Amino acid sequence: MEELKSVTKLIESFSRLPGVGHKSAEKMAYSVLEMADEDVEMFSEALIELKRNVHHCPICGAYTEDDVCEICSDENRDKTKIIVVSYPKDVASFERLGVYNGRYHVLGGVLSAVNGVGINDLNIDGLEKRIKEDNVQEIIIATNPTTEGETTALYLARILEKDNINVTRLAYGLPMGGHLEYADSLTLSKALEGRKKI
Amino acid sequence: MEELKSVTKLIESFSRLPGVGHKSAEKMAYSVLEMADEDVEMFSEALIELKRNVHHCPICGAYTEDDVCEICSDENRDKTKIIVVSYPKDVASFERLGVYNGRYHVLGGVLSAVNGVGINDLNIDGLEKRIKEDNVQEIIIATNPTTEGETTALYLARILEKDNINVTRLAYGLPMGGHLEYADSLTLSKALEGRKKI
């Protein structure tokens, strides 16, 4: 007996998720068979709705369900201070701290020779445009503390030098080789407090 | 900034899967945002199709996409020999061995005082009906080697005693406390070979 066609298809989809191997995907697919119909429908719709409703904010590049994201459209947030992150989800890590009142800019990745990501693949033009238009005073670079994140930070620091702004980098409270999204709030707070000029 | 509504919904659905905590569910939801539209649509449809197409075989209780499952409708499979398993997915574990030419019966669980599963919650009547109608000679009980699986096996052995059939239990090659679906083929083959009368 072969695996049923419908089961095989779902296993394939689950296998595409990060950290899910074939055995886990199989377990997940069979667990769906045991779920209530309503829950599976909700699951199925949630997938489609996510892709339909969520897009990048045209200003900062973060994920949003509105025309412009909540932060970019909030006039109480300080326009002259920008935290630059690599990925949209990194914005949520900072917002959870509740201590930052500036804005964000999402690069959409890191410079990487291995993965063929160059300066034109990152949203750097958008950042420079905002710096000019919003009279930005401080840029806090918060790329991941990895080799590629460092390279990206140094590149940004160099090209922003000419503008008269304070460019800082998160302090190392973060362990090298780690990823922002796994940092606990305390570590991330410390890193934000101890940011240094580069 | 709160997590976006569409993201929260999908995280909830992913969290319902076995072995998926909140952090993993979050990672999965964000990875869906990076997937191609076609892949997400395929994923969404696979969920719905699974529930629409797959149901229990009315004879043995295994999962099937047909009216009657492949094994129950195959006249070359020996009707007089039945492996009794707790869960539909356990059938696939035996079929993978390619050494068994009999049929299966899925109980739909194990007797469990803790989870409130009694004899009327398991498909035992169906088994007794098949034993009579198909002149079954041998029943191989293959519930999981856990306390509840054992209890179920002993109960079955007791009620099948009166019929003149050979009731066996898988040999212990399986480690106690484990689950059938994780057994490698060799271990499972040994267990099948060494089955003993109970």
Image (tube, coloured by chain):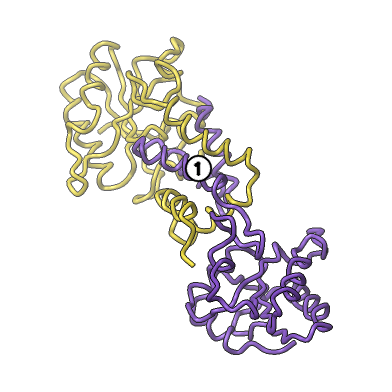
Chain colours: A purple, B yellow
Up/down of B107 relative to B181, above or below: above
For residue A124, which quarter of the picture? bottom right
Left or right: residue B180 compared with residue A122: left
Q: Is residue B170 visible?
A: no
Numbered disc 1: secondary structure: loop
Q: Along the line of sight, which residue is nearer the eye, A65 or B90?
A: A65
Up/down of A129 relative to B41, above or below: below
Q: Along the line of sight, which residue is nearer the eye, A45 or A16?
A: A45
Q: How many other residues sit within 10 Å of disc 1, few (<14), some (14-19) or many (≥20)?
A: few
Up/down of B49 relative to B28, above or below: above
For residue B59, which quarter of the picture? top left
Q: Along the line of sight, which residue is nearer the eye, B142 or A2?
A: A2
Whole-percent x and y of residue A11?
54, 39
Whole-percent x and y of residue A159?
83, 77
Left or right: residue A188 compared with residue B156: right
Left or right: residue A79 compared with residue B151: right
Q: Residue at x 32, y 37 (%)?
A: B143
**What amino acid does circle 1 point to?**
Asp
Residue under numbered circle 1: B184
Q: Residue at x 42, y 13 (%)?
A: B73
Q: Residue at x 25, y 27 (%)?
A: B123
Whole-percent x and y of residue B79?
36, 14
Number of numbered tags placed on the structure image: 1
In which chain is the residue bearing label 1? B
Q: Along the line of sight, which residue is nearer the eye, B137 or B16?
A: B16
For residue A146, which quarter of the picture? bottom right
